[in-house]
Image: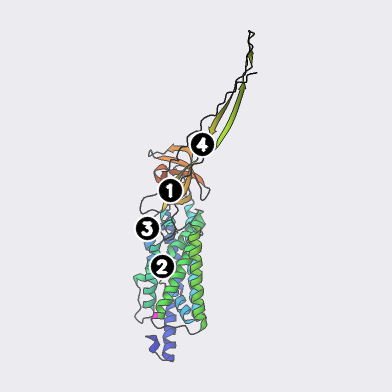
């Protein structure tokens, strides 16, 4: 353990670890290549290319350097490693944005993988946490070598960042800046767990800065998590947040129309004159049609559905499970004989087309029409 070393041995040991964590030219070059492969993988919707992009990514040693600078309170280690991670992240973002510009030639594209990796979910948190712990613990060992944990860490961090770059270049909504916010959240999470791992292994803050910077990172992570969860755009119903319950509300607006038709009195000259006047008011009730609302409900394994500008057309919005839409009444069959409905999203105010099979409608209860009021008055002079 490092706590058993003498001050001189500790200083030499920390310098050796810091040299391993320092970013190099290869780190930046392979980050650029990884971003390009991830962007192409999103364009062709291939998870295999995404895995290849993560395997091409460099060793995530600078991220451990950020954790090391955090736990030691060393501005030198922290600033150098954080600067290296920032440059590598910009290269991934840039190369993915170029892929997004190239993808404009074939839009609209499904890009399901890009939307999935820009949504907040629990499995990435688990994988990134385990990978950060393993990468940090192996980096400080003298026999440190390439490990699967670094690939898993690169996959967890670079996939949402690449999705953000793809959205920035292609203009596809809900990828930028959702993916960028998600990357920042995952980066803070990996940094905190890496620092905690180093602390358990005997590394301790040498100054107050070590505690303060760790607390600042934790605060940033909490704020990002609250911002993402409050926006509700990248959660998608797979996290432990309150699930919106759909309650159909039927509202009928009755507009009474009074039609008054008086009959003229009829006088019959007889021995006894009797004048009869009959007044019959008629009330016609005209109910206004109630808007039909529906819930977006997709099968297990999916977070939601896409809203398109036409049947099988360009994606204009993402509607997650539990989203409420209003059916506008227009329908259309596509070449596969599937029924599409034109709807209005009550959450994003987007109007587009969605498959009927992805919606669950609720029939509002009918309200009996009140009987028409009738009255007859026969005055007797």
Quadrant position of the N terminus in the picture: bottom left
x, y (%) of residue 143?
34, 80
Which residue occupies 63% across, 14% down? 274
- Gap in angstroms between the C-alphas marked 2 and 1: 33 Å
Q: Element at badge 4? A: loop
- Gap in angstroms between the C-alphas marked 2 and 4: 54 Å
Which residues are the magenta region? 200-204
The residue that label 4 is drawn on is: 289
- Magenta highlight: main SS: loop
Is tag 2's residue or tag 1's residue first in the polypeptide sequence?
A: 2
Q: Which mark is residue 154?
A: 2
x, y (%) of residue 8?
43, 91
The residue that label 3 is drawn on is: 47
Specify few, some or many for label 3: CA neighbours under 10 Å numbering under 14, 14-19, or 20 or more: some
Is tag 2's residue or tag 4's residue first in the polypeptide sequence?
A: 2
Please indicate, yes or no, whether residue 208 appears anywhere in the rendered image. yes
- Gap in angstroms between the C-alphas marked 1 and 3: 26 Å
Q: Is residue 14 magenta?
A: no
Q: Which mark is residue 296?
A: 1
| Marks 1, 3: nearer the viewer | 1
- Gap in angstroms between the C-alphas marked 1 and 4: 22 Å
């Amino acid at each position: 353990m490092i706590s058993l070393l003498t001050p001189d041995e500790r200083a030499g040991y920390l310098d050796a670890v810091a040299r391993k964590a320092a970013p190099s030219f290869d780190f930046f070059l392979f980050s650029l290549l990884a971003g390009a492969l991830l962007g192409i993988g999103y364009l062709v919707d291939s998870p295999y290319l995404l895995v290849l992009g993560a395997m091409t990514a460099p060793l995530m040693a600078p991220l451990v350097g950020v954790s090391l600078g955090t736990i030691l309170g060393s501005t030198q280690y922290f600033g150098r490693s954080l600067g290296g991670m920032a440059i590598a992240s910009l290269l991934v973002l840039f190369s993915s944005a170029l892929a997004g510009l190239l993808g404009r030639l074939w839009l609209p594209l499904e890009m399901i993988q890009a939307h999935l990796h820009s949504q907040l979910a629990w499995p990435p948190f688990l994988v990134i946490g385990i990978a950060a712990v393993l990468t940090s613990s192996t980096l400080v060992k003298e026999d440190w070598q390439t490990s699967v944990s670094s690939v898993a860490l690169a996959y967890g961090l670079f996939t949402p960042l690449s999705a953000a770059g793809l959205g920035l270049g292609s203009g596809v909504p809900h990828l930028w800046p959702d993916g960028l916010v998600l990357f920042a959240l995952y980066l803070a999470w990996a940094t905190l767990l890496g620092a905690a791992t180093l602390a358990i292994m005997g590394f301790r803050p040498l100054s107050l800065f070590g505690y303060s910077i760790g607390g600042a990172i934790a605060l940033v992570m909490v704020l990002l998590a609250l911002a993402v969860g409050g926006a509700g755009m990248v959660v998608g119903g797979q996290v432990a947040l309150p699930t919106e319950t759909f309650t159909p509300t039927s509202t009928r607006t009755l507009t009474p129309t009074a039609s008054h038709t008086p009959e003229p009195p009829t006088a019959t000259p007889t021995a006894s004159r009797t004048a009869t006047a009959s007044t019959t008011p008629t009330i016609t009730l005209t109910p206004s049609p109630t808007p039909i609302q529906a819930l977006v409900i997709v099968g297990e394994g999916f977070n939601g559905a896409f809203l398109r500008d036409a049947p099988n057309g360009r994606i204009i919005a993402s509607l997650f499970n539990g989203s409420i839409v209003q059916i506008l009444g227009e329908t259309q069959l596509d070449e596969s004989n599937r029924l599409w409905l034109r709807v209005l999203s009550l959450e994003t105010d987007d109007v587009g087309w969605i498959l009927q099979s992805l919606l669950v409608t609720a029939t509002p209860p009918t309200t009996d029409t009140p009987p028409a009021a009738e009255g007859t008055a026969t005055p007797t002079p």
